[in-house]
Image: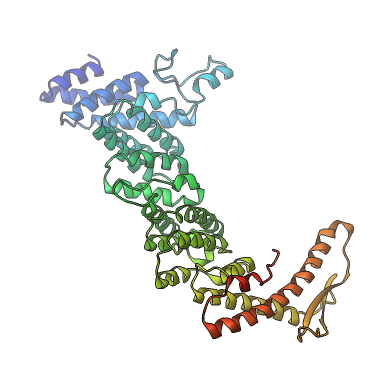
């Protein structure tokens, strides 16, 4: 009697201890079984497990299958039982040509269809065994995704939920780099319609959060849950950001932080026009990342501008709270000038923008005054003070390019230096006008009128 026949009898007469012992003795022959026999044995063991019988054979069958997969992945892949010319596991293919091997055995996922018939519990055991044997985790992740899709065709809602939980838990044990961010968001969109466990949902959000720098705006534009008034699920994105900051920790590079900051600027600009978005949620998005993540805050300023325009009913105190989230030091000159004449912003913010701009101009001009020509450098900048103009009664600083030892290939550098000369002249003019504007603002404590603000010159960046 063959081992498979004994398994069939064992499934009918589970109380027969002699058959069980005899079956266990045949385990020694597992190494010589063909791949189809291993699959049949595994299916019978699966049936035994479903009726509550466990003899240890199941674990040994799984271990033999994983060992066989590990061997074939290191050597040449073997054909699956679903292949038209497959009659079992073939470890020796000496008679086949190289081209035939490429066509028949080149794919690493040849076994996906064969093992997709397993129950979720067996797949969980299979994945754990493969991870313990250091099997290729990229292939494991692909199998889990294949398993999820193949099971969803005929599964009920409860079966789909169970499959998704097994797939998510399995992916969570793998290295984060083994699965793409796009695939994780694909799972998320399926999960939204199923009531999976909180543990599995948290694992999925953590995996997505750890790869936030690879996400796109379309990935984040997830509709809000049923029963909420706002358009997009802001709370979910906030949890992604929390996972990104917590999971990354000190390993977060400035490049990754800037990518996420740019993505969040786009997302905030997208949700700002939502009239149902509460102030607390909008502020949470603005302050979610540290200041160091952004080199420029112009995009956030424009998003706040849109939010204040849509939510015109905000009180002065609430507007101040929003504006306090701005980093005025990282606003460009154009943004500061625009803010100073923006009637939607409170007067305090206009003054703060002007003060910040004045400090930047002062530091720039002070640095220009203190700069000394480097005699050893081939490129020297000499500073001179112009005579006071009668109409303005103040000094004007003029930068001019000294003798530059540059070749014709560096004409762009020459043009850049000439542009710097013009820019410093304009900065000084703007600084003096801003000082006069600030004096008026401090006396009246009212925001500048549009006519006065429009008189301020705009810098060309």
Q: Indicate whether 81 appears above or below 219.
A: above
Decide if residue 173 is in sight here.
no
Quarter of the N terminus within the rendering:
top left
Relative to 389, 150 lies left or right: left
Along the line of sight, which residue is nearer the eye, 135 or 432? Answer: 432
On the image, the x and y values in percent for residue 418 come to 81, 67
Q: Indicate whether 391 appears above or below 129.
A: below
Decide if residue 297 is in sight here.
yes
Quarter of the C terminus within the rendering:
bottom right
At x 45%, y 12%, the residue is 85
Along the line of sight, which residue is nearer the eye, 6 or 380? Answer: 380
At x 42%, y 37%, the residue is 141
Query: What is the basis of the colouring in this image?
Result: rainbow
Q: Indicate whether 7 appears above or below 281.
A: above
On the image, the x and y values in percent for residue 268 come to 47, 56
Q: Indicate whether 307 appears above or below 42.
A: below
Relative to 451, 193 lies left or right: left
């Amino acid at each position: 009697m063959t081992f498979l026949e004994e398994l069939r009898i064992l499934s009918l007469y589970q109380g027969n201890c002699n058959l069980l012992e005899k079956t266990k003795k045949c385990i020694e022959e597992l190494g010589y079984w063909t791949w189809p026999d291993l699959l049949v044995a595994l299916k019978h063991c699966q049936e035994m497990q479903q009726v509550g019988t466990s003899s240890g054979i199941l674990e040994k069958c799984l271990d033999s299958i994983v060992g066989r997969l590990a061997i074939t992945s290191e050597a040449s892949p073997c054909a699956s039982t679903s292949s038209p010319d497959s009659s079992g596991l073939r470890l020796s293919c000496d008679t086949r040509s190289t081209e035939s091997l490429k066509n028949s055995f080149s794919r690493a996922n040849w076994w996906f269809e064969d093992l997709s018939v397993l129950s979720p519990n067996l797949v969980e055991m299979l994945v754990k065994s493969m991870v313990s044997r250091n099997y290729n985790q990229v292939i494991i992740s692909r199998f889990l995704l294949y398993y999820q899709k193949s099971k969803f065709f005929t599964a009920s809602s409860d079966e789909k939920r169970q499959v998704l939980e097994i797939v998510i838990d399995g992916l969570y044990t793998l290295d984060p780099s083994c699965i793409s961010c796009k695939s994780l968001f694909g799972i998320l969109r399926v999960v939204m319609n199923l009531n999976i466990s909180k543990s599995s949902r948290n694992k999925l959000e953590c995996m997505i959060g750890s790869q936030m720098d690879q996400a796109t705006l379309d990935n984040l534009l997830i509709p809000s849950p049923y029963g909420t008034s706002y358009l997009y699920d802001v709370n979910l994105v906030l949890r992604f950001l929390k996972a990104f900051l917590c999971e990354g920790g000190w390993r977060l590079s400035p490049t990754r932080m800037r990518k996420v900051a740019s993505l969040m600027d786009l997302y905030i600009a997208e949700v700002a026009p939502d009239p149902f978005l509460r102030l607390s949620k909008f502020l949470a998005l603005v302050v979610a990342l540290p200041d160091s993540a952004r080199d420029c805050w112009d995009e956030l300023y424009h998003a706040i501008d849109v939010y204040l325009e849509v939510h015109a009913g905000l009180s002065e105190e609430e507007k101040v709270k929003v504006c306090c989230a701005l980093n005025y030091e990282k606003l460009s000159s154009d943004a500061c000038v625009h803010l100073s004449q923006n009637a939607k912003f409170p007067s305090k913010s206009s003054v703060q923008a002007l003060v910040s701009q004045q400090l930047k101009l002062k530091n720039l001009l002070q640095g220009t005054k203190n700069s000394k020509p480097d005699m050893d450098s081939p490129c020297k900048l000499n500073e001179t003070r112009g005579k006071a103009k009668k109409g303005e009664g103040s000094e004007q600083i003029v930068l001019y390019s000294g003798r530059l030892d540059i070749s014709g290939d560096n004409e762009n550098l020459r043009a850049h230096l000439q542009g710097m000369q013009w820019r410093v002249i304009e900065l000084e003019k703007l600084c003096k006008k801003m000082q006069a504007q600030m004096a008026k603002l401090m006396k009246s404590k009212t925001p500048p009128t549009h006519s006065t603000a429009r008189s301020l010159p705009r810098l060309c960046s």
